[in-house]
Amino acid sequence: MFTRPFRFERAERLADASDLLRLHGDEAKVIAGGQSLMPLINLGLAAPQLVIDISRADQGRGARVISAADGYLTIGALVTHARLAVDEVAAGQQPLLCAAAARIGNSRVRNRGTLGGSLAHSDPAAELPLVMVALGAEYEVSNGERTRPVRAEEFHLGFLTTALQSDELVVSARVPSLGPGWGWAFAEFSRRDGDFALAAAAALIRSSDGAIIESRVAVGGVSDRPIRLADIEAALSGATAQEASGRIGAIRGISPVSDTGASAAYREHLAQVLVRRVIAEACQRSEAA
Amino acid sequence: MTDDGSTAANGRTLAVHLTVNGRPITRVAGAHFTLLRWLRDAAGLTDPKYGCGEGICGSCAVLVDGVPVSSCLVLAAQVDGADVVTASGLCEPDGSLGSLQRAFHERHAAQCGFCTPGMLVAAAAMLAGGSTPSRAAIRSELHGNLCRCTGYGPIVDAIEAAMQADARQAGQTGQPADVAAEAP
């Protein structure tokens, strides 16, 4: 609680925050909802000289908007988890996102925490980076002068590490809308509601005449970033919902760690169970769709 | 504010104005003050408590513009101009105990008392607008507030009792009682 003093600047536009980041470099940190940065500051793990507040930036502009067009849903970086969880446009276009947002932390975290904050913090157990990777999302990142798209899988590089340059901020994320015949599911396991997940999984499945045509499966909490499971996606192709479970082999390409929360072996077991559950649930929704 | 040896001249202190429990308060404090520290150390309201510093325990919960937040995870400067309600602000206009405060007292919903201000704020948010959550929904929502004494039973009892008292009150004052009963 008794943190090192720092200066505070409010950015009226996201571009102003990038200007300040260029000026102050590593000494500055950006805050929006503060649900990731403030714990680090309170615990003494981050000690910025300057905190740049973007929580009131871009009033009425892109970073606050949720919109659907041309088969895509775009969510502004300053949209809170609480809003995303219940937004009607988002729920209509991509309900997987809303389900994941509703599982974040507790209501206080969701009331302040923002999409851009969660993506830029890139905690490997966080819900939104996982579903973004599963959905094949594309983020718009900008330094105020130059804006570029970055695919979710190329953005989340490792533990709390992203492809953002030092003066860049996430402006929005764009995901494909849920098309006809697609089903979705999200599941996570934590010791207590609201804790970070020991493991989490998300699946999207499109089936026709009882057979899986296309699938997207990803896991979180069992690597230094969310991992898309291409092997399992390939194995599911052509399977009926009944056959799907038998085709899910060992999960490859993950590297769970052992800590006070759980052993690596237990996390791997959880991932296996959750992947089976989300695939079964997504199949059911796909058949009902 | 001289506790950290800084002055307004170097940008390390600033004035923040908040309406706290209906009372306008302006204080100059460290720019790094969380809302919690501003309330406790600058404004002298000691009901919100510092527990974990991570947004998990809920003992620092306050309402900011009507929604619950962890005051340890918000900088006071970020919410300059906001309307803040703490547990002590959940009283009646004449200062007597509000329905939640009274129910917590009558149901013995506090032992050591450290979590109690956050529990009251969480409960106020749950019952806002005449909502009538089920007992299961109350228990589920309280996952964001840790209590190491009571086992939660008396707290859930108190929230249900306050909900029923509010519904009776609404009925007596001529508001349709089903405004509360039909809420989602």
Image (cartoon, grey):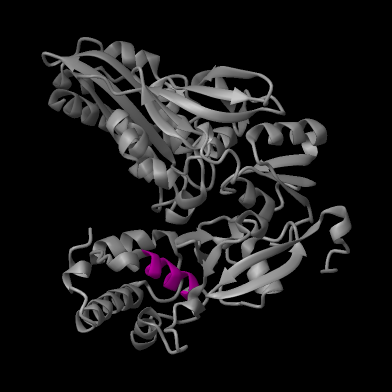
Above or below residue A98? Residue A7 is below
x, y percent for residue A286: 19, 24
The number of callouts visible is: 0
Seen in the picture, residue A237 relative to A145 is either above or below; the reply is above
Q: Is residue B59 magenta?
A: no
Please say whether residue B53 is visible from this viewpoint.
Answer: no
State whether the magenta stretch is mostly helix, strand or loop: helix
B122 is within the stretch colored magenta: yes
Q: Residue at x 36, y 26 (%)?
A: A68
Which of A273/A197 is in front? A197
Position of the C terminus of chain A by quadrant: top left
Q: Is residue A247 left or right of residue A284?
A: right
Find residue B118 and report its horizontal and vertical position in percent.
48, 69
Residue B100 in picture, x, y percent from top left? 37, 79
Residue in the image at 30% along x and 33% along y: A95
Residue extent of the magenta highlight: B116-125
Position of B179 compared to A266: left or right? left
**Residue A27 locus on image (x, y percent):** 79, 40
Quadrant housing residue B23: bottom right
Q: Quadrant of residue B179?
A: bottom left
The residue under the point 64% across, 34% down is A14
Residue B167 visible in the picture: yes
Of residues A72 and B119, the one nearer the viewer is A72
In the figure, residue A198 lies in which quadrant? top left
Between A263 and A204, the one lying in front of the other is A204
**Residue depicted at x 32% and y 59%:** B140
The quarter of the picture where the N terminus of chain A appears is: bottom right
- Would residue A25 appear left or right of A37 to someone viewing this image? right
